[in-house]
Amino acid sequence: MTEQSQNRDVENYENYEPQGSEIDLLEILFNIFQRFWIVIMVTVVFALVTAVYTFFFVTPLYKSVATVYVITKQNADMITNTDLQTSTSIVNDVLVLVKSRPIIEETLNDVDIEGVDYKTLYNAIDVESPEDTRFMNITVTFPDAYQAEQLVNALARISVEQMEDVLDVKSASIVEEGSIPVTPSSPNLLMNTVLGGVVGFLLACAVIALLVVTNDRIRSADDMERTLRLHCLGAIPEGKDFKSAAEREQEKKEVKERKARAKEKKKKDRKQAGKK
């Protein structure tokens, strides 16, 4: 290395100011690929743990749906456009009425399920109406499929009775009663397992990336030039083939001794051959 280059290195080192570490995406991807077996192992463990937890510890829930048709009639013999418009607007009031305390408490008294109170049933009820229709879907989500069917049908029947008394709805009827659900609506074992695997995969990659970013050790000549702005003058080899100066001197001494012994042996052999 020339004197000018040495002076430039010294000047760079003296003017060196620590900077924030640069994120090398290729290095991060290389480290993730290098430890891919760890990523796969963590992914599988998270997926299995999620599947076991979902299967054994998450309570399955069943949904039963009843459909109610709401219509108001000014004339008992025919339905006018005014009746249809009025029925569409009154559906919003019906949605609130279904989840009112009197209807829920009457439903609980009718079905009589032990351990179920007003708040529990209120949270289990979902009422919706498709846009611009007079149909209303009442859904009850419950841990027991048979009880879910009982609750939704009692709720729909009592709601229709209360509509006539409270909202003066003259022609509300149950179009479809709730049925006993065969399969649970939640949890979804397959989806939860996949999500658990995805979380494990992302977590493993994030940990590896964090270890790479926070590792500020100088591991190569490129790291030294990039971090300290100094050129590499030489490198000390590593491995089994590298030997210290003392070891090399010892080897040379042993070689000389072997050569001397071999030479001495040859002399003895010649003398013995001459005597014969």
Image (cartoon, helix red, strand yellow):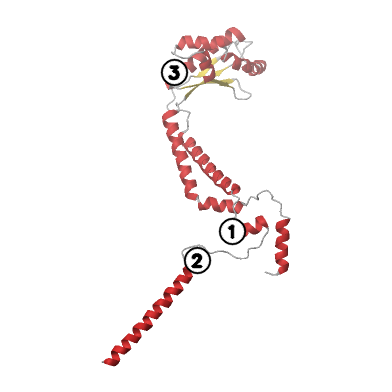
169 is higher (above) or lower (below) than 274: above
Instruction: Identify whether 211 is placed above or below 110.
Output: below
Residue 127 in picture, x, y percent from top left: 56, 20
Give the percent coordinates (x, y) of residue 272. Answer: 29, 88
| Amino acid residing under circle 1 | Ser
Residue displayed at 71% across by 68% down? 3
Question: Nearer the observer, disc 1 or disc 2?
Answer: 2
Residue occupying image coordinates x 58% and y 51%: 28
Provide the residue designation for mark 3.
147
Residue 12, visible in the rendered structure: yes
Q: How far is the residue under mark 2 from the one under mark 3?
A: 83 Å
Mark 1–mark 2 CB contact (< 8 Å): no
Question: Which label's residue is closer to the chain start, 1 or 2?
Answer: 1
Quarter placement of the C terminus? bottom left
Under mark 3, the amino acid is Gln
Residue 150 image position (x, y, % from top left): 45, 16
Q: Quadrant of residue 266?
A: bottom left
Looking at the image, is 273 positioned above or below residue 122?
below
Q: Which labelled disc corresponds to residue 247?
A: none
Q: Is residue 67 visible?
A: no
Q: Which type of secondary structure does the marked residue at label 1 adopt?
A: loop
**Mark 1 sits on what residue?**
220
Identify the residue under disc 2: 244
Q: Earlier in the sequence, mark 3 or mark 1?
A: 3
